[in-house]
Image: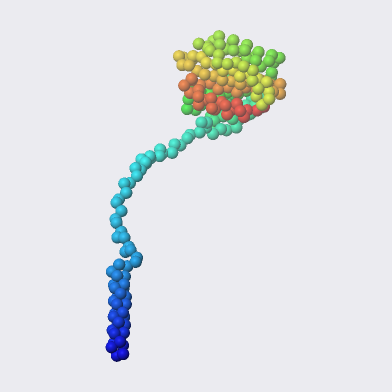
Amino acid sequence: MRQRSSRALAFALVSAYTAVAALVAVVLLAVASPTQAPAATPVAASAATPATQPAIRESAPPTTKLPKTPPFTPVTGPNGIMSVIPTGWQLKPCTSTDCAQADDPTDPARFLRLGASPAPSESPVSLQTAYEKEFSAGRVNFQRVKLVAATHHGFAGVDWEFEYDLNGVRRHVKTLMWRANSQDNWVYASAELTRWPETRDIYDKMADVTTP
């Protein structure tokens, strides 16, 4: 009976030792091989090739745009016609009656006219066509640009434009005549051809506001 007990005890001790040894082995294995993988060692990223930047364009300096036309001053001409002329120009009587003229103080070859006179029986177009024949007879290389019926502020009239040579220099002239209140009213601009574009701006403003 004692021998059997000794064997049983020895077997129990061997089993316990085996279990403890297995447990220790598991613990050591866990320590040597953790279940979580170690964090990856960060690798320095290679420097990215910079994208090609668009060339920087320098903007042009702002351009100051000068007004096409100068400041204007209201004027009253013969027989009550009202208009405007560039500020600094002086309105004075023409050599003919019922007419006033404003000369460019910086260019004596450029001038404006306006006027009004009692209307005859002929139509504005017929009257201006007849006057063109008279005027052109004494002008060198006269050339009509246009002579057409027109209206101004609802009144019937005629738009006449022409060129001619004076002392070897080409000139350009434009005039608008319209019949209102039993009067023939007109505005007129004359300049050397090289200065006509800027003169046309002045003429347009003058014609646009002239009354009646």
Q: Between residues 94 and 134, which one lies in front from this camera angle?
A: 134
Q: What's the colour scheme? A: rainbow
Establish if 96 lies above or below 14: above
Q: Left or right: 187 with respect to 3?
A: right
Residue drawn at the location 68% of the way across and 25% of the way down: 154
> Which quadrant of the structure image shows residue 27?
bottom left
Image position, residue 41 (x, y; %): 29, 60
Q: Position of residue 88 (x, y in %)?
A: 52, 32
Residue reaching furthest to the bottom: 2
Residue at the spot x=66%, y=16% of the render?
Answer: 124
Q: Nearer the viewer, residue 43 or 22?
A: 22
Residue drawn at x 65%, y 22% is 151
- Give the left or right position of residue 60, taking residue 42 as reference: right
> Left or right of 186: which side holds 107?
left
Quadrant showing the N terminus: bottom left
Residue 103 visible in this rendered orientation of the protein:
no
Q: Pick out the residue farthest to the top.
A: 137
Tell me if residue 93 comes above or below residue 62 in the rendering. Answer: above
Where on the picture, by quarter, is residue 181?
top right
Q: Is residue 165 left or right of residue 119?
A: left
Residue 128 or residue 89, whichever sits in front: 128
Question: Residue 37: x percent and y percent?
Answer: 33, 63
Q: Tell me if I can see residue 181 in this picture.
A: yes
Q: Of residues 89 and 72, which is closer to you in this image? A: 72
Which x, y percent locates residue 93? 59, 23
Q: Quadrant of residue 203?
A: top right
Numbered disc total:
0
Q: For the point 63% across and 15% down, which residue is it?
A: 128
Where, quadrant-wise, is the C terminus in this rendering? top right
